[in-house]
Image (tube, grey):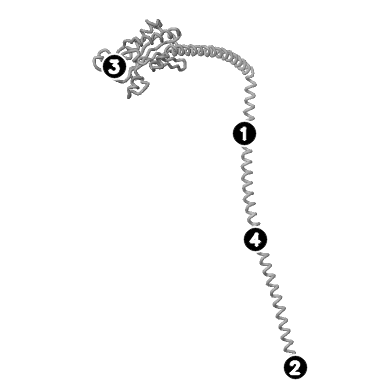
Amino acid sequence: MKFYFKFSLFLVMVATLSACVSQTEHQQKLDENQYLQSVIKGLEGDYENLKEDKNQLVDRNDSLNQRLLEAIERNKRLQEDLMRARADLDRVEKVLASRSAEAGAAMAEMRQDIDRLTEGSSELQQQLEVERLEREARLAEVQGTYDELVGKLEEEIQRGEVKISELKGKLTVNVVDKILFDSGKAVLKPAGINVLQQIGDILKVAVDKDIQVEGHTDNVPISGTLAQKFPSNWELSTARATTVLHFLQEKAAISGERLSAVGYGEYRPVASNGTAQGRASNRRIQIVLTASKDR
């Protein structure tokens, strides 16, 4: 009985040990399998990366091949251009060689032309300098006349009866009509005669200047019995300008060759005709002094 019990216990122990050994080997197999699976996954990842690198290298190689073909084509065209340029150069050299004497003569003639142009330019510069000095002298003369007029007519200027302006050698004396004429008339008033005499005494000295007398009115139409003598403002402005012109010729002894008169009527206003003050500014005589024209 004891023998059977001991034998049974031995079998149980052997079975238990066998089970433990088998379980340990199984776990080792599982661990090895898991490791191999991880190695395989890593290799698969490396494979995909290598595959991607290969595709990129293929694409890059295709691009380089295309660029190489383009470079070869450009080089071919450059070689062709170079050959044509050399051929053209050869032809030009032959032409120049055959026309060397002709070219030398042309160069000599060109130098002569340059010398003539240089001489002409020098003469032109001298002429321009003379004209500049003459212009400055004329401007100085006009400025002197301006200063003299301002000095003599200071009171009239302060009262607003006379305005004097100078622009680019053109001197203008603007006289309001009320100091020269009564309303609707073309006969000079005593005060107007005095002003015109002072103006004439100064202007007659500027013998190289032309004098134009301009008559201006407002836009109020001529009416009543006055219209029988002056049908419109044209006639009134022209009559007044002519009256001033005759005074400058006869009383101030200014040569008639320097004088001219024109009537502008209402058509060159300097202010709005919508107010009494504006209409008063538009009724005026302007005496314009300019450089004389060839007669």
Q: Are marks 3 and 4 in contact (CB under 8 Å)?
A: no
The residue to which callout 3 is attached is 232
Pinpoint residue 213: horizontal percent, then vertical percent.
Answer: 38, 12
Give x and y (percent) for residue 210: 42, 10
In the picture, measured across the screen, residue 88 lies left or right of residue 1, that is left
Residue 2 is tagged as 2
Name the residue that disc number 1 marks. 81
Of residues 254 and 294, the one nearer the viewer is 254
Find the distance from the CA under tag 1 to the CA under tag 3: 83 Å
Name the amino acid type tagged 1: Asp
Identity, as a three-letter code, of the amino acid under mark 4: Gly
Nearer mark to the viewer, of 2 and 1: 2
Disc 4/disc 1 C-alpha distance (Å): 54 Å
Work out whether 49 lies above or below 149.
below
Residue 262 position, x and y percent, is: 36, 13
Dot 4 or dot 1: first in sequence order is 4
Tell me the SS state at disc 1. Answer: helix
Please tell me how crowded label 1 is: few (under 14), some (14-19), or many (20+) other residues with Cα within 10 Å. few
Q: Which amino acid does label 3 sit on?
A: Ser
> Circle 4 sits on which residue?
45
